Amino acid sequence: MREVGPGARTTISFKVNGGAVEVDVSAEDRLIDVLREGLRLTGTKEGCGIGECGACTVLLDGKPVNSCLVPALQVEGREVETVEGLAKDGRLHPLQEAFIEHTAVQCGFCTPGMLMSAAALLRENPNPTREDITRAISGNLCRCTGYHQIISAIEDAARTMKAWGPVASGAGTSEPPGAPVVSEASRREIHSRNSAD
Amino acid sequence: MSPRKLGYVVPETLREASEFLREHAEHARVIAGGTDVLVQLRRRPERGGADGLRWLVDISRIPGLAGVSSASGTIRIGALTTHEEIARNPIIRKGAPLLAEACASVGSPQIRARGTIGGNIMNASPAADTIPALVALSARVRLSDLGGTRDILITDIFEGPYRNSAQPGEVLVGVYFDALPPTCRSAFVKLGRREALAIARLSCAVVIERDGAGRVVRAAIAPGACLPMPAQVSSAEEILAGKVPDEATVDAAAREVAEEMVRRTGVRWSTDYKKPALEAIARRAIWRALGVNVE
């Protein structure tokens, strides 16, 4: 029986975005603490800290979970995917491209969690209806967009991914050929959109 | 995270879990999916936070405690089975559709992927979604300790809001109930402040069995989030019993559910709202358990 006493620390091993990691944790650390502070994967955001807002959503063994409600010690031997694992070889994931295309990002704080919930949905259901999408992101609060742009972006990403045929799932797999590259122009566009807000 | 200093143990067997829980009694708490425990750890003790807690006992790696099975008409749900698994499970969807509905209405996809039925029961929140459904199913829960197991009625596991009756060392291992026969219909209706992530303000679970002539042979009505202790409302069930329910009968039974709530809780500041709201929810749930969809 593994025992970590009050105040003591221990090392846990698990996979993040396909790579094996070892991190020093205490009994009170949560998965989000390990990701943001231990591994400096700051793409995952902490919003409410009590599982209400979904900003901290990551995939644990492929399922979307609130990383603020997962004790770090429960991640031992398991697989975590964060928003940092979506882009491959400098190319954004179709969901990320679609979010930019549809202006589904305003302040951006909910975006990483929203993307992970959407990624989990599209893996399980490549042809979601708008209702399926609404249900899949019902645990992710966005206070800026009013959700319509996000839902349209996810719909659009599903179409794009379907056009490519079988979608790569899981971390470490390669992107289908022809995935768009974020161009310098679209980067500038994002920047100017954000500064115009 | 929080200023308190907590320890964490990961037992590999029920024996290890029970031994540790006996030794540390009120200073230890079982954790599985963590969706309630981690929220409570962040609260101050005076606001319902876990005071005096020193150890979390993580039972999530004990084998054999997850999954749904059925044998000779009895359905067994392991304590570690998540809401998501229950909501999708074909045995539950066929044999206890109201429980599938209740599990599908819990929290959000993220919470349903982690939260377990055992945790929902043992956390004993008055607003727990699975509890009215389990009460209407007359479920039993199985507790395991060093000396063996004991089965008790679901209603006997509750001592009050957020208090269960398990003894130090006892771990809830599963929930059991009879699969509903094809002559039964059931419904779970919940009123929250919004669709997702809403804690139930009020809910109602109903099971109704009818004979070939359409007469009610058995009715079980269990409202949620509004009684001091989870229970069926037998006075409302009796209104339906033996009748071929028409609008007046259903209205009377629904009114009785709301009146019984007021009798049990007394008149509170919220009664003006809760009484007609519960009546409407009970009416909707009864009609749905009679095969009629009403809004």
Image (cartoon, helix red, strand yellow):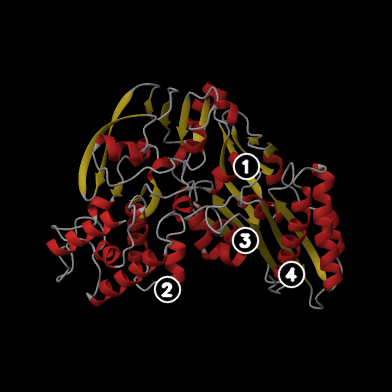
* Whether marks 1 and 2 lie on the same chain: no
Mark 3 vs 1, N-terminal side: 3
The numbered mark at residue B91 is: none
Q: Where's residue A28, x and y in %?
A: 39, 30
Name the subunit of mark 3: B
Q: Earlier in the sequence, mark 4 or mark 1?
A: 1
- Which residue is rendered at x = 63% and y = 45% of the image? B141
Rendered view: B224 above or below B58: below
Is A131 placed above or below A146 here?
below
Other-residue count near label 3 (Cα within 10 Å), few / some / many at <14 / 14–19 / ≥20: few
Q: Name the residue under label 4.
A: B287
Residue A129's tag is 2
CA–CA distance in space, label 4 to label 1: 27 Å
Q: Position of residue B163 (x, y in %)?
A: 65, 34
Circle 4 — which element?
Answer: helix
Between the residue at mark 1 and the residue at mark 2, the CA separation in whole angstroms equals 34 Å
Amino acid on which disc 4 is placed: Trp
Q: What element carries label 3?
A: loop
Q: Mark 1 points at which residue?
A: B125
Task: Give the residue type at disc 2.
Answer: Thr
- The foreground one among B173 and B159 is B159
- Residue indicated by mark 3: B72
The label nearer to you, 2 versus 3, is 2
Relative to the observer, which residue lies in front, B7 or A45? Answer: A45
What residue sits 25% from the left and 66% below the top? Answer: A94
Asked if the residues shown at circle 1 and circle 2 are in contact, with their CB atoms under 8 angstroms apart, the answer is no
